[in-house]
Image (cartoon, grey):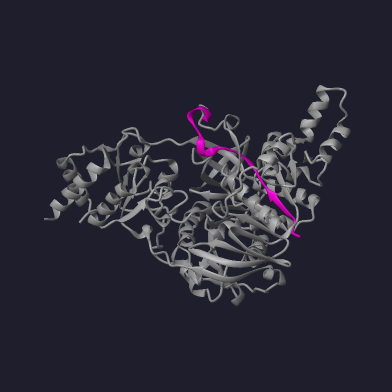
Amino acid sequence: MYNSIVLVKQVPDTANISGKVMKDDGTVNRSKLPAIFNYEDKVALEFALRIKEKFGGKVTAVSMGPPRASDTLRECLFMGADEVYLITDRKFAGADTLATSYVLAEAIKKIGNYSFIFAGRQAIDGDTAQVGPQTAEKLGIPQITYTEELIDVKRDRIIIRRKIDGGYEIVEGSIPVLLTVLKDAVDPRPFSAKRVMAFKGAKSLLDLEKLTEENSLLYIDKLVHEYEEKGLLIKTLTTDDLDVDPERCGVKGSPTKVYKVESVVLAGGNHARVEPTKTALSGLIDQLMNDHIFG
Amino acid sequence: MNFSNEVWVFIEQRDGKPADVSFELLCKAHKLAETMEGSVKAVVIGDNAEEIAKAAFCYGANEAMLIDHPSLRHFRTIPYSRILTKLIEEFTPRIVLFGATVIGRDLAPRVASHTKSALTADCTDLQISDVTYLKEKFPRLLLQIRPAFGGNIIATIITPDVPVQMATVREGVMELSLLSQPNPVKITKIDFHPDPADELVRIIEQHREENKVNLKASPIIVAGGYGLGTKENFRLIEELAHTIGAEVAGSRAAVDAGFVAPDRQVGQTGVTVRPKLYIAVGISGAIQHRAGMQESQKIIAINTDPEAPIFDISHYGIVGDASEVIPAFIEAYKNKLK
């Protein structure tokens, strides 16, 4: 039996940025971008699910983000996660990787009882690849990054293949260990139709609180209990639930500051247009020969 | 607060060979240290790595700290991060630079986390500047410049409140140049004591192939993009490269489409090159690609779309279909040789 915790992130779809989401000052209007499940984190979840199927155990998905990150956690349930946690608090907003890993590590300590932590190598909105290693460091456990293939799990050890510069290596890591995975490592399974039907109504504490505000006949404690019984509760952890120092969370706990943001400006128009004719091309080649680039 | 003015570079080695990026970073560190009136220290970790430490003085190091031990032959996160963490805590350098390689991106975040330092990944430029941020003045901060949001914007990151500013930089982004006169060698050897925690992750076997393709060393590169449409059309690129004695490269889209091998990819997630001549064919010129080639001395763009952004950074632009332009170019070139 090996329990896994999977770190997942909801990210703006940066691959599909169109003119509409760029503000006049060249910055990106995040709210205009569709939010998606960071793909490498889906691969991480697939690793955890395969370990569960082969060796038994439980898979817990954890996401830090705004309330709408519940969508991503619901998708984790659709894929096969047993339990999901939303780490959310206004005080966590604006966190860089140092503050994010601090809160994630505290949440993982609270959840406890794990052999593996899986995460995508990096998220497409920042491409830093830092949160995985920094979370491992804060938990005081080893890390294995750039995982390409799971080879075996034996007693208290996991054997994997990982990418290195110019090749690969096979390494053996002691449990507990944090692993970050590459996008081509495995194909994440599609959502199971049965699980979509079963879990599409999963709700976070924040969602349930909203329901009780709208309907005075509902009692929050009873509602939470009902949802938990049915496995439909997206558990929520806030500063009240975690033993965190507010000075190390969110903007306050983030040493990196964005000083300037510029949209990419091209010099533009100062190139020489060469007609695609033999004479013109011949002239271009002469020019390059004069510059000692050719010949 | 009084900060140090030391710039450190982690010198990466694989199988006892130094990584190019580490020496590139030493060259950059040398320039940063000049502006800061500071000095450059190389941190060399390995087994029998003294020669690597000596080489660092040709690229800008004023001092090298050498941690030499048989168990440090191959990079492993825990002992390497323990060494760096301890050194950083002891000496508090102002800046620490790492290559944005697999090793650097594994090591740097772990060290930054332990020392509570700020770390910016994949910088494409680094500068020293006095900064006013939220009405407060900060002298000589490290500006960490990198593309963000899928390359749609360029962000300048600063870390004004911490003593140690860290960054990773990809290979090829900073220029490699030997000092006209190497600095005098000054190597400080630092003891290493293995720890049981070092064995928590063990390397069972390692396979590494010499990179057969060396785009960085080629003075002329002909690169094709998705705009070529088919693998057959991509042959034109190979033919042109063969004729003029160039290496073949491709954009990420061309690699994804299977036109060209991944080790020939130029761009942010591929290789960064600065050849004498770069010929971009059927490449629209997304920032991710430009990031890998815009420092080329001369750029020729061939594209059917006159509005393609690649023309904006080109010296010569040819609007036309590659299947016509390339054969004409080859013919014109061959005529010159007659």
Which residue of the protein is positioned furthest toward the front in this rendering? A194
The image quadrant where one finds the N terminus of chain A is: bottom right
Seen in the picture, residue A88 relative to B15 is either above or below; the reply is: above
Seen in the picture, residue A112 relative to B19 is either above or below; the reply is: above
Which residue of the protein is positioned furthest toward the left in this rendering? B338
* Residue B298: x %, y % from top left: 30, 47
Q: Is residue A153 left or right of residue A226?
A: left
* Residue A159: x %, y % from top left: 64, 66
- Answer whether residue B196 is magenta in the image: no
Relative depth, front residue between B70 and B240? B240
Magenta-tinted stretch = A1-22
Q: Residue at x 33, y 58 (%)?
A: B218
Q: Residue at x 28, y 56 (%)?
A: B246
Q: Is residue B46 left or right of residue B232?
A: right
* Residue B325: x %, y % from top left: 23, 42
Q: Residue at x 71, y 35 (%)?
A: A200
Relative depth, front residue between A22 and A233? A233
Seen in the picture, residue A4 relative to A14 is either above or below; the reply is: below
Q: Is residue B6 visible?
A: no
The image quadrant where one finds the C terminus of chain A is: bottom left
Q: Is residue B80 left or right of residue B300?
A: right
* Residue A35: x %, y % from top left: 61, 35
Q: Residue at x 63, y 35 (%)?
A: B134
